[in-house]
Structure formats: structure tokens, C-alpha cells
Image (cartoon, grey):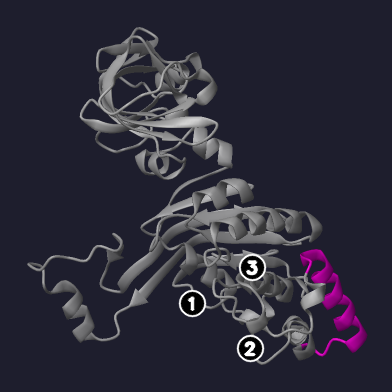
Amino acid sequence: MAEVQLKNIKKVYPFISGEDKKKSKKKADEPEKKKANLQITDEGVVAVQAFNLDIKDKEFIVLVGPSGCGKSTTLRMVAGLEEISDGELIIDGKVMNDVAPKDRDIAMVFQNYALYPHMTVYENMAFSLKLRKVPKDEIDRKVREAAEILDITQYLDRKPKALSGGQRQRVAIGRAIVRAPKVMLMDEPLSNLDAKLRNEMRAEIIKLRHRINTTFMYVTHDQTEAMTLGDRIVIMRDGYIQQIGTPQEVFNHPSNLFVAGFIGMPVMNFFDGKLTREGDKFFVEVGGYKVELAKEKEERLLKNNVQSQSVTLGVRPEHTDVGETGIAGKVDVAEMMGSSVHLHISAEGRDVIIIVPTIDMKKNYALGDPIHFTFGGNVAHVFSKETDKNLEF
């Protein structure tokens, strides 16, 4: 129902007074509480900078990143709850910077549900429609349709305090979808739920987006949610976009060291390695193990005219193979995960994780056991020591 464009969006939180500004620059000798590396300028603290994103009609976009990276601030700017310091927000071809939140045809689902405690589920869901003076029979139809979609019809006469966390979140989502908004915004809606409920609600949201014709913007710090829900993922850090791509793209081709370490569970293993160029061929070497990179990787490195250099080498735990030869290490912990075993080992002065399917286990490993591992040239990622960027891109 709506295309959304964010063009060079910037958000600056101004200092409250000159005194606050002084305080922020003062105490240089004191240990700093580092919540985030946000830029501080004469205007104030820059929370979001140079944010550019085109969202297609009915696309599901997920903003993901660590706490304080600017993802919720970006969402609130789209909602109209935060003023845009610079840049343009365009919805269906219309600039929305100065349009009141109620006139943007946007619905938002908050982390803490934000339900009216004195109203029943039905009244909570019907409230926004009543404000718009929608006819009673139409309100009733829309509320019951939304309740049916979310399987909360049996709770329509209850008040929020009589519901579980998962049921309250369904009500909050129902209250948003009855309006049939052009854009649905969700700000960490599952973070207050336990692991089992989160999994169930993720599945419900996936079903929901196929049943309602709207564009979704979803904020989370949980990369599992991002990977399972998003058509595309926007990975943020310190107010800047680090990479935009499909879940598969950001997993297979991380643009820099931060993305490589943030996406994937367990996290990618990193080594101090050496990249060697021999004519049109490229090899990576670590711990005496040397392997030629895959052809498509070599082509990208050639295109960028990459030369031999020391690199940070990244290999995912699931792409690592235990063998008789290769990089040497010692087992610290063996975690049985059912279908696989997670081996935590010490190798090359680092903690390394290897995932071994139980069906491939040749032996049971104990603390201190020697082990060797290898990886293929198709799964090795090479990052610049100077810029942290993936040398392929």
C-alpha cells in the first residue's frame, strides 16, 4: 500500500543548555561510560546520520543493530514521534517531514504493548476507529476480523491485566491492523516475551504479513528475528547504516568486520591471516594451513586490484571441518546441542568455535584434547586490517 523513502535522514539531539554542552566536553580525565560511539558536534549528539533507504510497497524491512545504534530513533522519525533534523521522509511520493503523526496513515506497535488498562480488548482495538468516527457496524467487523486473524476472539471481553504477555502483544498488533495502515511500524515487539513465546509470535508475524497488504518496518536487536522476518535487513552501528541486503546476502557476503561478527550464531571466527596474490590466484594462510580462494572470490579481488597483505580472516563455525591435518588447537569445551556439537577450542591465540554434526563425530572430545581443523576457499572472508572492510566489495 505504500512506498517509503528515507533520503539522507539525520537526527541530532541538541544540548539542553550551554552548561550541558560544557559538561559533555568536560571530565576528559574521567573514565567514560561507553554506551555508543555517537558523534558529538556543536549542534548536539548525532543519533542517526546519512540514512538512505528505499522501501518497496508491501516489503518487510528489519532494522537491526546493538543498543544505541539509532534504529528505534529512525523508526520514531518515520512515525512522527521524533523530529527529523535533516533529510526527507517520503511516503507514496509525498514529503512527510512536517505532517502530523495522526495524518501519516501509520500504525505503531510498541515494546511495552501500550494498551489502555481500563478498556477491554475489544475497546482497545476499536479505540482508534471510534476517534475517526467510523460507523459502529464497520468497527465491529474490522475488530472481529483482526481478532480472528490473531486468534484472540475469545479474549475480546477481557481487560489487559487478565492476559499473558503474548496475548497482550497480539492485542497491540490487532489494534494497529484494524486501521489498515499504509505502513506498520514495530519497535522490538517481542523483546518482553520468553524464548518459546518469541518463536511462536515470530511465526504469527510471518503469517500476518501475508494476510494484510501493508509495508512493514520492524526494529530489533535480535539477529534471529531479523534473519527470519525480513525481506531485507538494515544493519546499523553508531547511527550509520553498515549494510543493506537480504538475510542470505548479509550472511554470505558481510560488507565489513562488524557485520560479519554481528550476523550469525555462534559468531564468526576471526584469525590473523595472510592473503597472497599469485598472478590471478589468491590464497589465504593461517597457522600453516594454506588454501586457494573460490573463483568468484578471486574475480572480485582481481576487480578491486587487491594485492598481497596481512588480513583478518573470517570463517563461520558451521563452515569449519575437523580433520587429521590443518590448523592445530586444543579443546576447551564440547557442548552437545542435539543434532550437532559445538567445540570451543583454543587456536592461534584465539577462542574458536567449530560446529560438528553429531552424525559426523569420529570421537568424543574432552578438555585438552588436540584437534586440527580446515575450511574451504569458498567460505573464507578476508577483511582489511586498516579499514575492517571486506576486500571483495
The amino acid pointed to by label 1 is Glu
Three-letter residue code for mark 3? Gly
Helix or strand or loop: what does disc 2 sit on? loop
Does the image show residue 311? Answer: no
* Residue 156: x %, y % from top left: 79, 80
Residue 10 spot, x, y in % from top left: 43, 65
Mark whose residue sits in front, 1 or 3: 3
Assign the N terminus to one quadrant of the image.
bottom right
Q: Are marks 2 and 3 in contact (CB under 8 Å)?
A: no
Q: Secondary structure at mark 1?
A: loop
Residue 166 — which label? 3
Say if 233 sits above or below 192 in the image.
above
Q: Secondary structure at mark 3?
A: helix
Does residue 274 sit above or below 40 in this rendering?
A: above
> Residue 74: where, in percent of width, then height?
50, 65
Q: Is residue 86 left or right of residue 137?
A: left
Q: Amino acid at mark 2?
A: Pro
Mark 1 is surrounded, within 10 Å at the Cα level, by few (under 14), some (14 to 19) or many (20 or more) other residues, namely: some
Residue drawn at 27 percent across, 22 percent down:
329
Q: Which residues are magenta?
A: 132-151
Q: Residue at x 40, y 56 (%)?
A: 66
The one nearer the camera, 120 or 129, is: 120
Q: Which of pointers 1 and 3 lies earlier in the amino acid sequence?
A: 1
- Determine if the magenta segment contains residue 140: yes
- In this view, the residue farthest toward the top is 279
- Which corner quadrant of the image does residue 201 belong to? bottom right
Q: Tell me, for residue 83, which label it has, or none.
A: 1
